[in-house]
Image (cartoon, coloured by chain):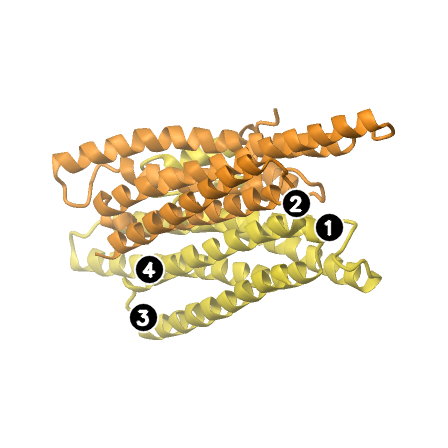
Chain colours: A orange, B yellow
């Protein structure tokens, strides 16, 4: 495992910029999501809440704990996405001289593509859960941190959009129709929900 | 200077998540922009271009060189933004017992707020220049990397939007009307242009 989060940030940027397939957009989306979550954690951890009530602090503390676990999940998905795509490329490189080799290669490619679809789908799911918590932070977080929440939501929206695009691209090469239909339905529902949560969070910031 | 890019990525995420004002949304926007630029660099560095013509490779190589310098600029702006905001907070902590102290403090706050406005304005400008180059990469880059370009553009849009929000918030506390009018006009023009470039880049990806 590459463990991108253990690298210096400059090394991670260099890895993204290298003309090699991984790490690519799927990893960048997951890490951008982790950055967005971190900003929401910051605001949910401020000693002052929007209204100052104790109940509000309890809600924010709960949000912060849930966000912390989403952040770890997204950071891990940055690795999982690159690893899954490396497996797809390895499968494409399998020998294809005999009919038996061809069948084995096709199966391996299809299997690897499923994993490469599930990684960004999970990134989309995690970004969606974070955007749901973003509504809570936008509603109850200290007003002085409004722009931090706004940037956090924007990064999570970019993460969700990028992850969804990666799911859809891999679905295009898959043959298992039941898997495709299920993943397609998931990505659509998750995008709809996260879009609504982002709109609601931004609206809460402006009230 | 904090040099966020020298830190492990996990340490940067921890710094964003800490309930302290910096690093905050301004820094996250700049670093997300640097990630978006890195993805565009990756695609502009692939040996295969969209059409395969030599002229296309020349255009992409030029874009890659310009992107590399924008990436360094955005990485540095991540530090500059935090530093500028620290100065604002330091100015607010200045003594205000006498009239002379009050005047000195007000001047220091106004001065620091100007620097804290110029940092995100430069992030917006750099993200805008990168989105302009994103059109080139979207038009001429290898089709197999479409989703990488898409994520790159999405991150740069989030960076531009976040930077613009940070400029506007600081402008609200400034008193120098000429400075405010000029920065306001800049942020509006830059947001309009970068929005158009993002739309054009996404359209080029789909053709």
The reply to whether label 2 and label 4 mark residues of one chain is no
The residue singled out by tag 3 in the image is B176
Proximity of marks 2 and 1: CB atoms separated by less than 8 Å: yes
Q: CA distance from mark 2 to mark 3?
A: 41 Å
The residue singled out by tag 2 in the image is A17
Q: CA distance from mark 2 to mark 1?
A: 8 Å
Query: Chain under label 2?
Result: A
Q: Nearer the viewer, residue A37 or A94?
A: A94
Query: Chain under label 3?
Result: B
Proximity of marks 3 and 1: CB atoms separated by less than 8 Å: no
Residue A84, relative to residue A142: is it above or below? Answer: above
Q: Residues within 10 Å of mark 4 (few under 14, many from 20)?
A: some
Residue at the spot 64% in from the left edge and 59% down from the top edge: B138
The residue singled out by tag 4 in the image is B170
The residue singled out by tag 1 in the image is B45
Q: CA distance from mark 2 to mark 4?
A: 33 Å
The reply to whether label 3 and label 1 mark residues of one chain is yes
Mark 3 vs mark 1, foreground winner is 1
- Which of the two labelled residues, at mark 4 and mark 3, occupies the earlier sequence position? 4
The image shows residue B82 at horizontal and vertical percentages of 42, 47
- The number of numbered badges drawn on the structure is 4
Q: CA distance from mark 1 to mark 4?
A: 38 Å
Mark 2 vs mark 4, foreground winner is 2
The image shows residue B109 at horizontal and vertical percentages of 30, 57
Proximity of marks 1 and 4: CB atoms separated by less than 8 Å: no
Q: Is residue A179 left or right of residue A99?
A: left
């Amino acid at each position: 495992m590459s463990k991108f989060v253990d690298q210096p940030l400059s090394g991670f940027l260099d890895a993204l910029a290298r003309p090699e397939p991984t790490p690519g957009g799927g990893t960048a989306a997951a890490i951008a999501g982790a950055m967005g979550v971190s900003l929401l954690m910051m605001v949910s951890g401020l000693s002052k809440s929007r209204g100052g009530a104790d109940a509000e602090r309890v809600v924010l503390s709960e949000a912060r704990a849930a966000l912390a676990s989403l952040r770890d999940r997204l950071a891990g998905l940055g690795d999982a996405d690159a690893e899954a795509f490396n497996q797809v490329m390895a499968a494409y490189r399998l020998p294809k001289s005999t009919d038996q080799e061809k069948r084995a290669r096709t199966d391996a490619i299809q299997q690897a593509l499923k994993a490469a679809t599930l990684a960004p789908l999970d990134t989309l799911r995690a970004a969606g859960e974070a955007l749901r918590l973003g509504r809570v932070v936008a509603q109850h977080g200290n007003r002085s941190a409004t722009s931090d929440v706004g940037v956090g939501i924007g990064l999570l929206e970019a993460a969700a959009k990028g992850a969804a695009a990666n799911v859809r691209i891999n679905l295009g090469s898959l043959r298992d129709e039941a898997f495709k239909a299920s993943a397609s339905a998931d990505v659509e529902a998750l995008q709809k929900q996260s879009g609504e949560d982002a709109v609601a969070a931004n609206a809460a910031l402006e009230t």
